[in-house]
Amino acid sequence: MTHLPARHLLLVHAHPDDESINNGVTMAKYAADGAGVTLVTCTLGELGEVIPAELAHLSGDALGEYRRRELGAAMEALGVSDFRQLGGAGRYRDSGMMGLADNELPGAFWGADVDEAAGHLLEVIREVRPQVMVTYDPNGGYGHPDHIQAHRVAMRAVELADAEGVPVERVYWNRVPRTVADEAFARLQDDLAGLPFDKSAVVADVPGVVEDDRITTRVHGAPAHVAAKAAAMRAHATQIEVAEPYFALSNGLAQPLFADEYYELVRGERAEGDDRDLFAGIGEAP
């Protein structure tokens, strides 16, 4: 019988790089603490825009394969060995930005049957028995079709797991408190002299920003975990340019690289008095 760790975290993301940007500190922390950490990525990001000129020739399946290797390097930096594609490699493809013809291409994740896709995620839940799952809010953080679909699939899989008797005790959505984002962007305007980033980004460009009172958990970034997050983000070189404590995607707009990561608990009970541990109180005697 396979031995399962006492605590297991499951993360559901749309494309390679989403995990490192949103949850790199969290993944590094719990992996280092001995918890099980499983990442499920729903597509390989075949339609992503490529930043380095020397890699500009990559597109479609070739880009997806390259990004799969980048994901492996990022997971090595975070200390995570269990990372998978939903339903197996190539099952679902990048859908592109909302409203584009790419949304309707054969195999696009946006068009996937939610119950079928959730069934693939349920197989992972059966295997690793996570107590905690992290994914996006109903808008996918910023409205990308694959992020919205990842949310739908993750939440449906939790329902199916409940019905099957393998419940996920807590579900969190990725968040950023508005005051933290405001303060970070105020610093950004002063810090970016000489860096090749555009300072015109605003708080609205950060996925998942909500009012502070919706935040239930903050995972603190110890220096080693923040360094691992930055290294993981650098591993996604087709998509991210890092100049700590900032980074930019292909649009060149500077964003803060958050050392602490924030969550909203949307399923399960919050442990009183502990807002820094996603697992606080789980498995403890009442």
Image: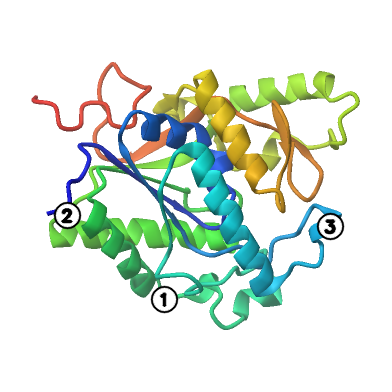
| Earlier residue among tags 2 and 3 | 3
Query: Along the polypeptide, which appears first: circle 2 or circle 1?
Result: 1
Select label 2 or label 3 by which is in front.
3
For residue 275, which quarter of the picture? top left
Q: Earlier in the sequence, mark 1 or mark 3?
A: 3
Q: Nearer the viewer, mark 1 or mark 3?
A: 3
| Disc marking residue 113 | 1
* Picture residue at 26% right of the left edge, 56% below the top: 125
Image location (x, y in percent) of residue 57:
81, 67
Residue 138 appears left or right of 34: right
Which circle, 2 or 1, is nearer the viewer?
2
The residue lying furthest to the right in this view is 194
At 34% across and 28% down in the image, what residue appears? 33
Disc 1 packing (10 Å; few <14; some 14–19; many ≥20): few
The residue carrying mark 2 is 166
| Residue 58, horizontal then vertical, whole percent | 75, 67
| 268 vs 57, nearest the viewer | 57
Res 54 label: 3
In the image, taking residue 106 as reference, residue 31 lies left or right, namely left
In the image, what residue occupies the spot 62% across and 59% down? 67
**Where does the N terminus fall, quadrant-wise?**
bottom left
Looking at the image, is 5 positioned above or below residue 72? above
**Amino acid on which disc 2 is placed:** Val
Residue at mark 2 to residue at mark 1: CA–CA distance: 22 Å
Query: Residue at the left extreme?
Result: 285
**Label 2 neighbourhood size at 10 Å, few (<14), some (14-19), many (20+)?**
some
Of the numbered discs in the image, which one, if any, rests on residue 34?
none
